[in-house]
């Protein structure tokens, strides 16, 4: 039998009808001299030199017997060898299975990029409406299927986005995320030994960025680690330099801690660049500090392997009408103005509603301007704009406000922790409108929801002031009555 590869020391072999163990090997032209140590019978413990392939030497292959694992170190070696045999290539996917969701080809780009990385560090910066949540879920489940991820933490702005993450991960990927809040951490402390870290007991966690950035919570987070961390709306964690406010600084510090305490990091944002190169490079720095030079600027084009950025105009599909050519998967949105002339029966009630809303909003708007509380200004102007738009737009806004109003009444922590972030996002939209003149349809829809949510929070705050006897109850009751109507 001709040997095609050198046998490693420690390999059990059969030569001259007896079992041996390879001690050393030395090449002499086409021959290899093996020093063998006997393992049985009269040659037990004795050493002989044998030339191969002049003499036949066959390695002994043992069948894996889990029921007879022998010493634990031997079993562990067999187990690791078995796992290596099951390793998938760079193009095989386990998570992308049909059934719970319809996957578009472009949505597989991030997961294919991820499995080629030794350490997944991605900035997923697709435009609004391309399914960043779905793409992040595909990456997570692929890492789980490959036994590379066991502890996962998703960090998101509080409110509807957190609910969306919980529903999407559960219904589409079968991942049941535990919402981490103050009550959850307290429950874990009561059920575990003294001094334990509650984050160590949450393997699949979903948490608000504003809750996590608190100093006491952040101290506990720094004493744990996660296999995968996802930060949604990552543009809130940019480093904008000396112009940075306290909340921005806290979110940036949180992102830096998370980047250090995880193996794989995925940042999600539809607006990765705010016009300042330093802001974008600060996001890349979270992924890999080596992408940034000593002056805080990007090192050439290295960052491109870590960034996935597509807009709807970039996503093409086959054109059945013109074989061989491509067409946009998402056609351009065409808005056609349609004049509406209400009759007398519908015009009068609508005008009365507009006047009633104006009477309610105008005093609050003047008060907000007078106190320079521009967050309140944004909230009340949003309702005013809807009241002079269409009846459908006004009704939709009032329904959204009413649905969130009761939730804000019972949620005392979110009132203080999420308002600044929501107002900041709304200001970003206003700046983009001033700069570019328009925003996309999905962005406009998100802006409307944020405005309605901010107004609902304002009403909830006013209701709390009533209970403390520091607000005019008649005025707020009138507003609430209009919402109920």
Image (spheres, helix red, strand yellow):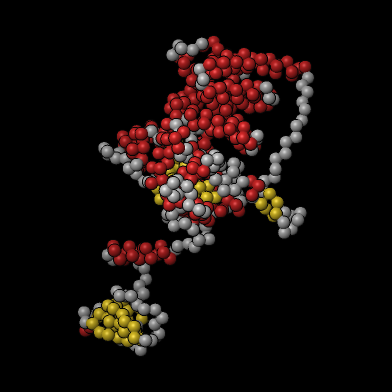
Q: Position of residue 211 (x, y in %)?
A: 41, 33
Is 102 left, or right, of 235 in this rendering? right
**Viewport quadrant of the C terminus:** top right
463 in relation to 232, above or below: above
Quadrant in the picture for residue 2: bottom left
Is 441 left, or right, of 216 in this rendering? right
Quadrant in the picture for residue 119: bottom left
Is 277 left, or right, of 33 in this rendering? right
Is 256 left, or right, of 440 in this rendering? left
Q: Position of residue 426 (x, y in %)?
A: 56, 31
Q: Position of residue 147 (x, y in %)?
A: 42, 55
Residue 206 shows in this picture: no
In front: 485, or 251? 251
Residue 376 shows in this picture: yes
In front: 155, or 57? 155
290 in relation to 445, above or below: below
385 in relation to 105, above or below: above
**Viewport quadrant of the N terminus:** bottom left
Which residue is located at x 26 percent, y 37 percent? 194
Which residue is located at x 65 percent, y 35 percent? 438
Which residue is located at x 42 percent, y 41 percent? 255
Which residue is located at x 57 percent, y 15 percent? 366
Outermost bottom residue: 54
Q: Position of residue 120 (x, y in %)?
A: 46, 52
């Amino acid at each position: 039998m001709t040997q095609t590869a050198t046998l490693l020391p420690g390999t059990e072999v059969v030569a001259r009808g007896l079992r041996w163990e390879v001690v050393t090997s030395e090449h002499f032209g086409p021959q290899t001299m093996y020093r063998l140590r006997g393992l049985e019978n009269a040659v037990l413990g004795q050493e002989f030199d044998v030339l191969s392939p002049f003499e036949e030497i066959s390695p002994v292959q043992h069948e894996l017997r889990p029921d007879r694992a022998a010493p634990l170190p031997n079993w562990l070696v067999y187990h690791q060898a078995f796992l290596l045999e099951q390793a998938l290539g760079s193009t095989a996917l386990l998570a992308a299975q049909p059934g719970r969701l319809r996957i578009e080809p472009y949505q597989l780009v991030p997961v294919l990029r991820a499995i080629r990385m030794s350490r997944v560090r991605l900035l997923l910066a697709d435009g609004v409406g391309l399914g960043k949540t779905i793409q992040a879920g595909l990456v997570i489940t692929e890492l789980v299927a490959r036994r590379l991820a066991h502890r996962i933490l998703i960090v998101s702005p509080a409110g509807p986005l957190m609910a969306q993450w919980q529903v999407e991960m559960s219904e589409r990927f079968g991942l049941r995320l535990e919402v981490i809040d103050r009550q959850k951490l307290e429950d874990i402390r009561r059920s575990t030994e003294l001094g334990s870290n509650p984050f160590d007991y949450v393997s699949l966690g979903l948490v608000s960025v504003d809750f996590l950035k608190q100093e006491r919570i952040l101290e506990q987070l720094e004493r744990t680690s996660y296999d995968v961390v996802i930060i949604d709306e990552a543009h809130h964690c940019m480093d904008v330099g000396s112009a940075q406010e306290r909340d921005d600084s806290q979110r940036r510090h949180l992102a830096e801690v998370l980047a250090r305490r995880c193996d794989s990091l995925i940042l999600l944002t539809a607006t990765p660049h705010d016009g300042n190169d330093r802001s974008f490079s600060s996001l890349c720095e979270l992924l890999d500090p080596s992408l940034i030079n000593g002056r805080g600027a990007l090192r050439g084009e290295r960052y491109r392997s870590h960034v996935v950025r597509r807009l709807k105009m970039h996503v093409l599909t086959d054109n059945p009408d013109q074989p061989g050519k491509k067409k946009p998967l998402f056609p351009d949105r065409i808005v056609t103005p349609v004049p509406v002339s209400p009759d007398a029966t519908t015009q009068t009630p609508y005008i009365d509603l507009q006047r009633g809303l104006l009477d309610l909003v105008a005093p609050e708007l003047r008060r907000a301007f007078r106190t320079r509380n521009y967050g309140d200004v944004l909230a009340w102007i949003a309702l005013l704009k809807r009241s002079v738009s269409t009846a459908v737009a006004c009704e939709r806004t009032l329904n959204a406000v009413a649905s969130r109003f009761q939730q804000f009444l019972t949620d005392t922590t979110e009132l203080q922790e999420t308002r600044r972030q929501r107002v900041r996002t709304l200001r970003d939209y206003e700046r983009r409108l001033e700069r570019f003149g328009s925003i996309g349809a999905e962005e406009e829809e998100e802006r409307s929801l944020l405005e309605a949510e901010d107004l609902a929070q304002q009403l909830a705050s006013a209701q709390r002031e009533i209970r403390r006897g520091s607000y005019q109850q008649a005025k707020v009751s009138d507003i609430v009555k209009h919402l109920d109507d």
